Amino acid sequence: MTRCGRFEAEAEMSTIVAENLVKTFGSGATAVTAVSGVSFRIDPGEFVGIMGASGAGKSTLLGMIGAMSAPSSGRLIVDEIDVYALPLERQADFRREYLGFVFQGFHLVPYLTALENVMLPLAVTARGRREKQDAAAAALEGVGLGGKARRLPGELSGGEKERVAVARAIVNEPPVLLADEPTGNLDSKTGAEIMGLFRKLNGAGMTIIMVTHSAECAANARRLITVADGRVSGDRPLALN
Amino acid sequence: MTLQWISVRNLMRRKGKAAFILAGLVIGVGTSVGILTYVNAVGHDILHKLDQYGANILIVPRTESLSLSYGGLALGGVSFELEEIREAELTRLASIPNAGNIAALGPLVLGVTELEGRRILVAGVDFAAAAILKPWWKAHGSLPGPNEVLLGAEAARVLNLSAGDRLPVGDARLTVSGVLEPTGSQDDQLAFTRLADAQRVFNKQGRVSMAEVAALCKDCPIEEMVQQIAEVLPGAKVMAIQQVVKSRLEMLAHFEKFAYGISAVVLLIGTLVVLVTMMGSVRERTSEIGIFRAIGFRRSHVMRIVFLEAGIVSVAAGAIGYGLGVASARLAFYFGGEGHPAHVPFAVETAAAALVLSVTLGLLASAYPALMAARMDPNDALRAL
Ligand SMILES: Nc1ncnc2c1ncn2[C@@H]1O[C@H](COP(=O)(O)OP(=O)(O)OP(=O)(O)O)[C@@H](O)[C@H]1O
Ligand SMILES: [Mg+2]
């Protein structure tokens, strides 16, 4: 790990270890424990689906795995880095170097074009202008949107927005992709396209952790963790289909 | 794709907000620059006119109404048409205790003449006294003899007269003997003739409109001489020019304090406008900031985006505010009758100060919104949508 925020040497591989993660919102009588003691280990290259009822704590858990939301107790260890022991700014660096996010909802920046949205994670890196543009164009090409680089999010369909979001998540070539209901807003055909994209990325070695309500989507994963009331209620491998 | 680019694109999208912030700063900076520039220009002007003025005591008739401006200084209560001082009375000046300090006494008869519809002020003067009172006078041609007239530079230009031409004054036709080099004072607009000629053509024999006294006053208190002259000339008003200047400078200082108070208030309001608008803008962008943070922007990166936006708008506001400030100072200077608007200069130091002020206020007012943006928890920010 160097001073200027690059974790790259370690970021080739990434073993994610959750140690008894707990997240409590509020305090006293109104306290809500969204996640109460979750432990698991995810190895490099896995494709993990997380399922559970609404309010079970899936998004909260994903936020903790994503270095965005410190657990009330417990630890997240990635490649021997105790993520929440890092200073806040280093946590941001960690997110940038290690993780790609596809959020629940598209969360594109409305005043930036598709290409610019994809380039966003590169804005705070030292790469040259050309290099950034090429990387973003390649990522857009990869999700099949090469022809719509200059469109604003408002001029794209739901599925296209989702694909821009995926391109943005992978433009930095992170070892891990986190997705919260990536197909939640899409029809099943478009959803299947996105799933195909995920399988391709996973095939290239990217670890994918995906929260979903849809059994159809979850069937693309190789391992399924089910969550109920903030706890892991099941964790099993899935057969390839 | 850089942080600057994000700032610029956001400003372009939220033009209304950007314009609001701009307006807040422009009004604040413009007011301050305008007032500062105006006060400086007027102050300079007063001192400049004092420099231009050789006499340091003026003797004018007492009167109730009508004001005369001579040498650009409003002297109050003088009407050359109605009231005069008797010339003979002026000899009494020789009897005052400090008579030895009087270097020159210059009686002045004022009247108006017209040439082709243009009115011009004619002053009958004692040219021997004038040489002491106005040592900077340089005439092209010669000083006027009997029935001759010496024109100020402006007067000659406007009337299109030069040496040898004729200027009708009253019943007489005076020959132009020469033209004064520009002095930068009101003398440029006058025509000067011998005292006796002026008294004759204006029918003011034995009377003068006013008198100027040059006092050698290194070691005498000028106030005392004013007092002494006033005692021997009870019908006249005696003033030290310095007093006139001093009281004008004092008035200016009062105005200055008041005006600075007002600009402080306007600046404060402008800053608050920036603060409130920025806060609103940051709140509106909650989910966007959540994205920035989630994809690995540091807190400092988010702050930089906000500060960059504020900085860009502030620089523009500084420049526009400076321009508007100087322009309004010029208008005020001109319509306030102080003089030509070009006397209010564009000053590099003021421009730099305006920029610094604008940027400082813009960034200060954005500090809290920027901090608020940086402090947002990425997880909460994303949930906010
Ligand atoms: N910031 C917060 N403040 C208070 N309570 C919260 C907060 N975030 C989540 N919760 C609560 O924690 C619980 C789990 O929320 P979470 O968003 O993780 O559920 P989820 O499993 O993702 O549900 P869904 O499938 O509907 O997205 C819920 O009861 C929710 O109300
Ligand atoms: Mg959720």
Image (spheres, coloured by chain):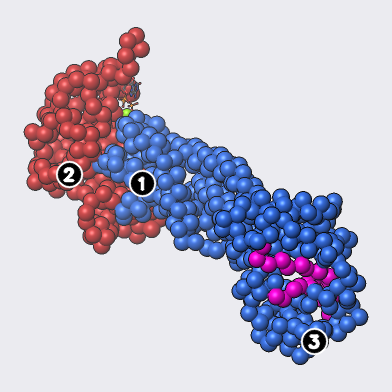
Chain colours: A red, B blue
Whether residue A108 is in magenta: the answer is: no
Kindly identify the residue that appears in the image at 76 percent across and 76 percent down.
B192
**C-beta proximity under 8 Å, tags 2 and 3:** no
Task: Check the image and name the residue furthest to the bottom.
Answer: B164
Task: Report the side of B338 relative to B66 (left or right).
Answer: left
Say if residue B277 shows up in the picture: no
Kindly identify the residue that appears in the image at 70 percent across and 75 percent down.
B128
The numbered dot on residue B31 is none
Magenta region, residue range: B102-128
Q: Position of residue B215 (x, y in %)?
A: 64, 61
Which quadrant: the C terminus of chain A? Answer: top left
Q: Position of residue A55 (x, y in %)?
A: 32, 22
Secondary structure beneath dot 3 equals strand
Where does label 1 land, which residue? B305
Labels 2 and 3 within one chain = no
State whether residue B92 is above or below residue A173.
below
Where does label 3 land, which residue? B175
Q: CA distance from mark 2 to mark 3?
A: 90 Å
State whether residue B168 is above or below residue A184.
below
Of the pair B62 and A238, the residue shown nearer to us: B62
Mark 3: which amino acid?
Thr
Secondary structure beneath dot 1 equals helix
The chain letter for the residue carrying disc 1 is B
Of labels 3 and 1, earlier in sequence is 3
The numbered dot on residue A5 is 2
